[in-house]
């Protein structure tokens, strides 16, 4: 399904636009499974007011939630890192099951969002029940390759939110728009010491002299679920990489990882094509990940 077009669509750029499926037929909201049009969250929810929440995006593949245990564990770690009350993991799991069963979607994305619940119009929190929303939308599996653009802004590897998957995604929205305006479909961040970090919703792997490397978690990147699985099944060195080395003259091949992308070859960096897309190392990683995806629900 193509993205809905707003009233300003006619005056938008002529550049190609990525299409996103926005259809969400059912959602689980604080204990109830409701039609999306009837789903309600308070206007004073702290997740809405100040982005005080955490989330997970889980791949729905052939009607099954892939690596749900790992995602739920990370949701709990992110909540703890943000100082939120621990989520009821049994409820989260139950909510995912109900939404998946009711939606009858074969392939898509499951979005689990947990916020601090109702709060004031400011940064302080109120004691009270959290907000839990679980929704699912179709995903067309069109993630064949990616063109990345390095953005001028930096991830703060020492920041309070470093390594947490929070709903404070404003800088990702801005960075992705920057990449799209320049013909890319993913933005790449360096950190404050000019080392390679991550994408807006992905981790990055590089091949140099036949050697597979990825930034360490100390770079400030998210501990991606797919990143961890690739490290386990393929192996790679976790090394700091100077952002200046993210160029086709140094990088032989590269790929992104995320729950929806899987292992996605990078075709170009800042408009300059890589020599191999996909190269042999990327192909090996993609094949191994595909085999894992087809063999188990909980790797």
Image (tube, rainbow, N blue to C red):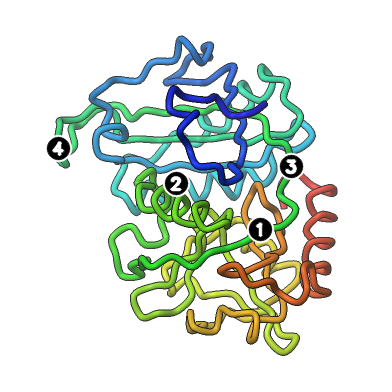
Q: Residue at x 60, y 42 (%)?
A: 18
Residue 213 x/y as whole percent: 63, 79
Between discs 1 and 3, the one toward the N terminus: 3
Categorize mark 4 by other alpha carbons within 10 Å: few (<14), some (14-19), many (20+): few
Residue 73 x/y as whole percent: 52, 48
Categorize mark 1 by other alpha carbons within 10 Å: few (<14), some (14-19), many (20+): many
Q: Looking at the image, which is closer to me, 208 or 57? A: 208
Residue 174 x/y as whole percent: 39, 51
Which residue has dot 1 on it?
Answer: 146
Circle 3: element type:
loop
Cα distance, mark 1 to mark 3? 13 Å
Which residue has dot 3 on it?
Answer: 141
Q: Looking at the image, which is closer to me, 125 or 46? A: 46
Which residue has dot 2 on it?
Answer: 76
Which residue has dot 4 on it?
Answer: 122
Q: Residue at x 65, y 67 (%)?
A: 268
Q: Is residue 219 left or right of residue 156?
A: right
Cα distance, mark 1 to mark 4? 38 Å
Between discs 1 and 2, the one toward the N terminus: 2
């Amino acid at each position: 399904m193509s993205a809905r077009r707003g009233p300003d669509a006619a005056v938008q750029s002529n550049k190609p636009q990525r299409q996103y499926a926005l259809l969400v037929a059912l959602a689980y909201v604080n204990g109830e499974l409701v039609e999306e049009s009837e789903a309600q969250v308070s206007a004073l929810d702290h997740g809405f007011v100040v982005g005080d929440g955490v989330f997970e995006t889980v791949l729905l593949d052939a009607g099954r939630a892939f690596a749900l245990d790992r995602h739920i564990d990370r949701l709990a770690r992110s909540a703890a890192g943000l100082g939120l009350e621990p989520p009821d993991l049994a409820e989260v799991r139950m909510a995912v099951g109900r939404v998946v069963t009711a939606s009858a979607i074969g392939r898509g994305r499951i979005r689990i969002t947990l916020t601090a619940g109702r709060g004031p119009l400011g940064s302080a929190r109120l004691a009270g029940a959290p907000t839990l929303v679980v929704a699912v939308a179709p995903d067309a599996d069109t993630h064949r390759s990616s063109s990345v653009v390095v953005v001028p802004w930096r991830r703060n590897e020492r920041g309070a939110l470093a390594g947490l998957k929070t709903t404070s995604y404003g800088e990702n929205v801005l960075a992705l728009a920057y990449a799209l305006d320049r013909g890319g479909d993913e933005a790449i961040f360096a950190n404050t010491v000019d080392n390679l970090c991550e994408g807006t919703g992905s981790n990055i792997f590089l091949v140099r002299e036949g050697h597979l490397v990825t930034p360490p978690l100390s770079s400030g990147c998210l501990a991606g679920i797919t990143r961890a699985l690739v490290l386990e099944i393929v192996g790679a060195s976790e090394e700091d990489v100077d952002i200046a080395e993210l160029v086709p003259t140094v990088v032989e091949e590269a790929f992104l990882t995320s729950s929806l992308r899987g292992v996605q070859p990078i075709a170009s960096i800042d408009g300059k094509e890589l020599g191999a897309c996909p190269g042999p190392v990327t192909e090996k990683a993609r094949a191994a990940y595909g085999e894992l995806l087809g063999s188990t629900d909980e790797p």
